[in-house]
Image (tube, grey):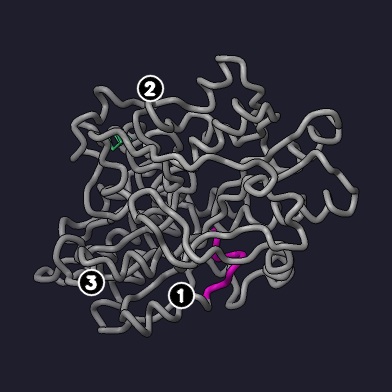
C-alpha cells in the first residue's frame, strides 16, 4: 500500500538504526519525548527501543486524548447519561475509562443508561435527527485533529435547526501541553526528566502546521522533529533529533513532509475558530489545570453546548490512588513503575486511562510485551 508499506521496510529500518548507532556520541545521553500516543503505539508495536543504543531513551508524553481526560470530566459524562436521561454518544475507548469509584460509561450502559458508541460526531448528529423526542449529546474529546469535525457538526446542527443535539466539549490543545511540560520543574531543572527534544505529532500537525512549534525551539532551545506514524518515520525523526543535539541546534524540522505544511490546514483552522474559543484553563490528567489548553463553544453556538444546556454537578473524583497515570503522562514514570501494571490493571480490566486506549503507554507496554 502506497505511503504505508514503503515506510515499514525492515532493510531500511536497519539502515537508519545503523546510522543512529554510528552518530550517537558515546559520552552523551539523549532523551526525546514523543508527545503523541500514536507514536508511543508505533514505537512499541515495531520494537523501536530494541533498535536504539542504550544512551538513547524515549519518554512518553501526554498526547493520548483518552488518557488525559481527568476523572471529573468522565464523571460528568456519566452524569449526563444517567441523571439527565440523554442519549450519550461516545467514541468506543472513552466508554471504558474508569471515572470515580471505577465506574465507567460502559458500566453505566450495562445498568441501563442509553449510551451509544459512535465512530464519528456525524453519527451522533444522525442519531439526534432519528430521535427528535430525545436529547442527544456527543461526548467530544481529542486534540486539534478531531476538533474540525466536531465544529462541522455544530455548524450543520445550527443550519438544520436541530434542537435536540448538543456537544459536551473536551477538545484540548497540543502547544499548551508542551509548554506545561517544558515549564514543569521536573523538566526545567533537567533533573527528573532530562528532555533533549520532541517528536512532534503527526495528525495534529496536519491541522496546525509546523509553525506553532517554532516557539519551543527558540524559547526553550529544544529541537522538534514532526514525524509520521510509521516506523521509518519515527526512526528517521530520532536520527534527525540526534543530529540536532550533536550540532547544538534547536530547530523545527519536518520529517512528515508528505502531509504537514508550515501553516497547516487553513480551512479547518478557520472552521474551528468560528465555533470554538479557548477556555482560560482546563484540567488535564497528570498536568493539572493548564492555562488556555482547552476549547469551549462560542456564544453564537451556545445552544449546542451541553455544559450550558444541562447544569452538571462538579465532581471531586480523583484517580485510583495506586494508579501512576498522572506521573506517566508527565514523563516522570513508566508503566513498569506502577505496582498494578499487568496484575490488578490489564486492558480487559483497566484501573487507569493509560491502559484503555492503544495510544496509552500502559496498553502499549502490555500489548507489546514490555511488562517482563
Ligand atoms: Fe494506571 Fe493501570 Fe497504568 Fe498502573 S498500569 S498506571 S493503574 S493505567
Q: Earlier in the sequence, mark 3 or mark 2?
A: 3
Name the image quarter holding residue 200: bottom left
Q: Quadrant of ligand 1?
A: top left
Say if the magenta span includes residue 249.
no
Count neighbours of disc 1 (C-alpha within 10 A) and say few if under 14, some if 14 to 19, many if 20 or more.
Answer: many
Predominant secondary structure, magenta span: helix
Q: Secondary structure at mark 3?
A: helix
Q: Quadrant of the C terminus?
A: top left
Q: Residue at x 35, y 83 (%)?
A: 219
- Residue 213 in percent (x, y) is at 46, 75
Count neighbours of disc 3 (C-alpha within 10 A) and say few if under 14, some if 14 to 19, many if 20 or more.
Answer: some
In the picture of the structure, the residue carrying the numbered disc 2 is: 349
**Horizontal placement of 346 versus 81: left or right?**
left
Q: Earlier in the sequence, mark 3 or mark 1?
A: 3
In the picture of the structure, the residue carrying the numbered disc 3 is: 188
Residue 372, relative to residue 69: is it above or below? above
Mark 3–mark 1 distance (CA, rounded to whole Å)? 17 Å
Q: Is residue 259 visible?
A: no
In the picture of the structure, the residue carrying the numbered disc 1 is: 213
**Count of numbered tags:** 3
Q: Which residues are magenta?
A: 203-210
Q: Residue at x 39, y 40 (%)?
A: 316
- Residue 346 in percent (x, y) is at 34, 25
**Horizontal placement of 28 versus 154: left or right?**
left
**Horizontal placement of 56 versus 141: left or right?**
left
- Residue 340 in percent (x, y) is at 23, 29
Name the image quarter holding residue 190: bottom left
Mark 3–mark 2 distance (CA, rounded to whole Å)? 36 Å
Amino acid at each position: 500500500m502506497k505511503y504505508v508499506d514503503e515506510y515499514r521496510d525492515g532493510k531500511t529500518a536497519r539502515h537508519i538504526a545503523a546510522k543512529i548507532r554510528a552518530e550517537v556520541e558515546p559520552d552523551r545521553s539523549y532523551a526525546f519525548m514523543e508527545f503523541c500516543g500514536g507514536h508511543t503505539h508505533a514505537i512499541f508495536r515495531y520494537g523501536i527501543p530494541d533498535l536504539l543504543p542504550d544512551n538513547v531513551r524515549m519518554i512518553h508524553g501526554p498526547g493520548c486524548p483518552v488518557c488525559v481526560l481527568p476523572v471529573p470530566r468522565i464523571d460528568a459524562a456519566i452524569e449526563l447519561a444517567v441523571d439527565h436521561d440523554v442519549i450519550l454518544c461516545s467514541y468506543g475507548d472513552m466508554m471504558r475509562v474508569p471515572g470515580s469509584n471505577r465506574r465507567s460509561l460502559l458500566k453505566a450502559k450495562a445498568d441501563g443508561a442509553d449510551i451509544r458508541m459512535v465512530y464519528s460526531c456525524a453519527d451522533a448528529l444522525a442519531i439526534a435527527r432519528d430521535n427528535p423526542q430525545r436529547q442527544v449529546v456527543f461526548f467530544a474529546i481529542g486534540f486539534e485533529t478531531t476538533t474540525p469535525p466536531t465544529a462541522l457538526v455544530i455548524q450543520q446542527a445550527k443550519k438544520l435547526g436541530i434542537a435536540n443535539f448538543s456537544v459536551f466539549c473536551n477538545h484540548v490543545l497540543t502547544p499548551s501541553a508542551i509548554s506545561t511540560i517544558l515549564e514543569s520543574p521536573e523538566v526545567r531543572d533537567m533533573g527528573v526528566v532530562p528532555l533533549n527534544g520532541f517528536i512532534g505529532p503527526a495528525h495534529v500537525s496536519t491541522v496546525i502546521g509546523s509553525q506553532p512549534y517554532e516557539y519551543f525551539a527558540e524559547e526553550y532551545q529544544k529541537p522538534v522533529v514532526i514525524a509520521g506514524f510509521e516506523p521509518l518515520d519515527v526512526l528517521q525523526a530520532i536520527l534527525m533529533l540526534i543530529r540536532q543535539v550533536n550540532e547544538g541546534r534547536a530547530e523545527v524540522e519536518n520529517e512528515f513532509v508528505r502531509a504537514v505544511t508550515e501553516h497547516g490546514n487553513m480551512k479547518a483552522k478557520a472552521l474551528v475558530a468560528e465555533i470554538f474559543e479557548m477556555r482560560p484553563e482546563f484540567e488535564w490528567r497528570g498536568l493539572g489545570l493548564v492555562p488556555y489548553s482547552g476549547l469551549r463553544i462560542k456564544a453564537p453556538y451556545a445552544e449546542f453546548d451541553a455544559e450550558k444546556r444541562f447544569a452538571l454537578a462538579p465532581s471531586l473524583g480523583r484517580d485510583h490512588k495506586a494508579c501512576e497515570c498522572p506521573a506517566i503522562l508527565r514523563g516522570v514514570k513508566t508503566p513498569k513503575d506502577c505496582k498494578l501494571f499487568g496484575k490488578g490493571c490489564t486492558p480487559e480490566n483497566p484501573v487507569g486511562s493509560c491502559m484503555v486506549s492503544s495510544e496509552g503507554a500502559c496498553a502499549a507496554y502490555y500489548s507489546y510485551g514490555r511488562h517482563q
